[in-house]
Image (tube, coloured by chain):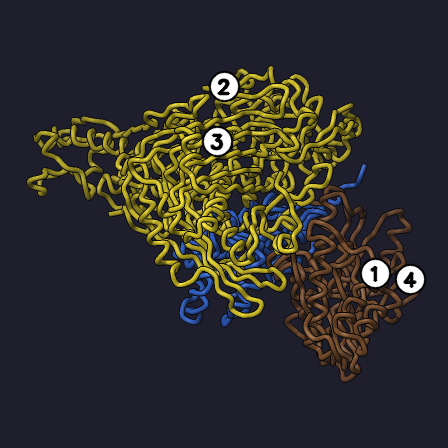
Amino acid sequence: MEASTKCEMQLLVNGETKSVVARHADTLLFVLRNELGLTGAKPGCLNGDCGACTVLVDGIPIKSCMMLAIETVGKAITTSEGLHNTAIQRAFVEHFAFQCGYCTPGFIMNAFALIERHPDADDRIIQEWLESNICRCTSYKEIEAAVKTVLANHPSIPNDDHF
Amino acid sequence: MAIGKSIIRKEAWDKVTGRAKYTNDFTEKGMLHAKLVTSPYAHARIRAIDAKKARAIPGVRAIITGEGLPLTGEDLRDRPPIAFDKVRYHGEVVAVIVADTLVQAEKAANLVHVAYEPLPAIGTPSEALKEDAPLIHEQLGSYQKNKHTYPEPNTNIAHRTKIRKGNMERGWAESDVVVETRVSFSPSDHIAMETRCATAEILPDGQIMISASSQSPFMIKRLISTYFGEDAGNIVVHTPLVGGAYGGKAPVQLELLAYLAAKAVRGRKVRVWNTREEDMITSPVHIGLEAAVKLGATNDGYIKAAEILFLFDGGAYSDKAIDVSRAAAVDCTGPYHIENVWCDSLCVYTNHPYAAPFRGFGHSEQAFAIERALDLLAEKLDKDKWELRRKNAIRPGHTTPTQVPLNRSNVGDLPACLDRLRELMEWDKWQRIEIDAYTVQAKGISCAWKTSTIDPDASSGVILTFNSDGSVNVISGVVEIGTGTKTILAQIVAEKLKMDVHDVYVKMDIDTQTTPEHWKTVGSRGTFMAGRAALAAADDAIRQLKAIAACILRAPADDLEVGGGKVFLRDDPSIYVPVKDIANGYKYPNGNAVGGQIIGRGSYILRHMTPLDKETGAGKPGPEWTVGAEGVEIELNRRDYTYKILKAFAVIDIGKVLNPKAALGQVMGAMSMGLSFASRETFLFDRYERVLNPQLRTYRPIRFGEHPEYIVEFIETPQIDAPYGARGVGEHGLIGMPAALANALSLAAEVPLNELPLFPEQIWRKKKGDIHDSF
Amino acid sequence: MIPFEITYHRPRSIAEAVRLFDTLQQQGKKPLYYGGGTEIITLSRLHLVAADAVIDIKHIPECRALESNPHELVLGAALPLAALEEAEPFPLLTKAASEVADRTARNQITLGGNICGQFFYRETVLPFLLSDSQAVIAGKDGVRQCSIHDVFQRHIRLKPGQFLVQMKVDRSYASLPHFHRKRRKQGKVGYPLVTAAAIKKDGQIRVALSGMCPFPFRSTEVEERLNARHLSLHDRIAGAIRALPRPILNDIEGSAAYRLFVLEQMLFDIIEELGGEETNGGLH
């Protein structure tokens, strides 16, 4: 019988330190969803292909289905539940940039990081980043419009609250 | 007030904050987890299942195999929920493991040893129809079936729909020119971002609680009752928000496994959840097709006869595939006036994953066949491709292939759609231009139409309740799968009650015990059926409000109006009582109370639907035909055959635009799905009919940055009996895209492209002259 | 979800990593070195990789080196591809790296992971094959440096316990005329149908390919034929194609015949762009 590798980890999620018990082999996605109840990140493929599990680790978009939770000890994790009334969320709502909403948290995390990192992003960079996420409901046209609106207005619309 | 406005969907903020919950997001401590053991073979006898090692894994609570289970299937009961004796497709479920955790269930599933004896596997409908083809369902003749399903025992034909309209001899006689084409494509997938998930719990009092990511929560009740003899009233299904469905979540599959799993552990709650690989091949897929179309026309371009053969690759089990094949037959000619029609539409068994409805329900498949033939006909007649379609466009006064007479209400204005498309595409300016030595741009068009083919007694109900502040709750059985229908219902109610749409709340999830039934959230019929029910419920509420207000205001109910949160005297609005004062009963100053909670109720059942005649197909399968004209503009690199889709157009007669941005989003999303399917989506099979690409890494849809410019407009010819005249539009954007793309690329490449998907390699092969005969 | 138990270890030095590997092995365990982890996690899920322990090398300073000296570039094997792209020390490498998977995945996929992993495309090795780079390898016998060609033939040849620490590239190669193109079956994300990388050094074209065969390669025979300027363009390319190693892949991305068709055009474009000084033949 295999020995259990469960251990207690302190994870910093959305600005809060959380204590979780998880296996070494558990992915960040699994721990966020099943130990912390943060179900915004989604298991679209568990293979790193669809981007529905995207969260930020130290501000960088990461596919949480392909990262071990234990690796993130000492790093700051941000999920969609940690973004409050940000410009990108408002833009997604106003531009009808989602329908079923399943891919949306992943897209928003990626777009949020893109705008922070490249406030002057051009089409090439926008495409490079956002082609990491699949949306099956929309034509991507509204997502493009939402992201470009935020980029265009970037200095003047403050992000209310995020970690 | 609310109709015609781009009202933001009610659940929008939940979705952008990660707080919206889908079926797999609900976890309960103590819940057990199921893992599926699936077949690595496409066709094989099961010799033995050895689960000894699996059973020894700590945490394993039950292992279920297929003995003694009833056969399932919506039109024809041919499918064991867990394979028994034989597996018929790669990925078919052969056992279900139930354990404390998913990891334990996975470990155990990996240790189940199944001994198979492979059988020859059939990969295409035409192979399946050969004289000496192995029978996939040896017992076809003994399966239970419904009245209008016609399997052909001792063959691999699950069902045949016949359309016989007019007089074919006369039609051919009147034709100066005849063309024949063949088209084909393999099965593909819906790949909704949320994979399928179902949980089941059986309480000690016998109540069966199911939660499911499904388009058919009410059908789940019916089927569990039918298949397993449970009382339907004792089954409660909960469906929260669904992460995309596109028809793939209309069939009932995982829910049956969850129920069986719960039964095996004394009713404890068990969750079954598909990995992406399972979602792609174990659960039902997008149907494949081999089709032959023969069209006859006069020299001046009037189509006189159409002979159509659809061989649908329904896969290993017929479930909803039969209905898809039937729906394609219903509208087999496309939206054209053809008096003489002969069509046989077969649902054929193969050893492929079995088919579910896919957005369009047989119509993008039908359109691909007809529209390729039309382009060929135009070439042969030396006529403009748009002219040919315009000339033959279906109109009020014509009949459909199933001989339903069309009028201004039950069919949209296709000529108007075509006229506008021509303008938008600047069709007359050019259709094919050579930009330089390597680059060619070309345009392709296709018409699209669809009616729904659903149960003739399909119905929908809506309940309205009032809150103490006068706001309203809308409770409807329509599932919010992304179409935004629930928000549309709020708009319809707001409009009718003349109130602010922000004061209309919608219950997003479905609970079959308290939510009125909506047949299934399919067929682009949500707005129509639930909308009619919502209007009826609003009328009911208005009647009740007026009745009470009549007492309070001491005026006849007929003199009263409801609007702006008040019930008021029509000729003197200053005399009124606020809705919120009567919504829960009215209290007189002296303390007496009258009335009670206002509960508006309404329902709608489809009217005058009839099944199809077995020999002629005559019948009325749906209430109306939504039409559209679509096109694409592409740029082909003639050196390496790569291409870009530059623009995609759609002009659809929507009856009435209820929510402009939502409607555009639906249509563009559907167009994108159609282009993605046509340009790159297919299952690839090895020679044993095993799927080689059941992952999003190897089955790759269109990504951000690959999208064309979308130009979408609407025509508004009201459907008189629909809410505010609105026609359903969830699917139609998809229907003409594959044909339009193939038409454009065929023109650009100067070679007929009749097989999907349209990979560059495929175009290269056709140019080289590799003949890949469809069948 | 990794359906078996593993222990996660995070050494802070090369010596500690090697020692850890050895210790775990002595205990009868199966350790794996762990870079981005993307491959280990996704393949474990499908029972295609087995391990008892993972040794994360991302916190070893040498493995994260990103140095640009007058003579050479030093690139740590634990650098995520996205970090390499942003730093842009070696333009051809940037182009190769930026086509792998997608941007978010590249925030995790490491240089070493891409070169040493199971997926046989290994597209980031192409620029190193072309530039005769040096590989720094750590193992029980210490840290040693050798030519990439000695340690990578179709795939990395490491002994158990060894891991790739860094790649070192002669500075002069980074500024040579170069070519990179990745053709996929369809679209802009996905495995390669054919990826061709090329540089021009001392008037000679060097070519490295991925996607043609179930391994990336650079072949002297192919380069000889391609550079045979006394022949027509058409004959040079035909000769290069004949000299390709076999088998040519024939799979779900495309047929062998189509790959050859695509490659032919790429070779022509390489010669044209890098200046192949054709004598006769012209366009074919």
Where is B60 relative to B654, above or below?
above
- Mark 3 residue type: Cys
What residue does disc 4 label?
C140
Q: Amino acid at mark 2?
A: Asn
Mark 2 highlights which residue? B146
Residue A120 x %, y %: 50, 72
C-beta proximity under 8 Å, tags 1 and 4: no
Residues under numbered marks 1 and 2 in contact, where contact means CB atoms less than 8 Å apart: no
Asked if disc 4 and disc 2 are in contact, CB closer than 8 Å, the reply is no
Q: Earlier in the sequence, mark 3 or mark 2?
A: 2
Name the residue type under label 4.
Lys
Secondary element under disc 1, as helix, strand or loop, is loop
Q: Which mark is residue C245?
A: 1
Residue B561, by quadrant, is top left
- To the question of a shared chain for discs 4 and 2, the answer is no
Tell which subunit mark 1 falls on.
C
* In this rendering, position of residue B272 left or right of residue C230: left
The residue pinned by badge 3 equals B343
Q: Amino acid at mark 1?
A: Pro
Q: Is residue B492 left or right of residue B673?
A: left
Of all chains in the rendering, the one displayed in blue is A
Q: Is residue B302 left or right of residue B143?
A: left
Which chain is in yellow here?
B
Q: Nearer the viewer, residue A44 or B546?
A: A44
Q: Is residue B425 above or below residue B43?
A: below
The picture places residue B233, in percent across and down from the top left corner, at 45, 19
Query: Going 66% across and 44% down the picture, which residue do you hit?
Result: B684
Chain bearing mark 3: B
Question: How far apart are the two marked residues, 4 and 2, measured between alpha carbons?
Answer: 72 Å
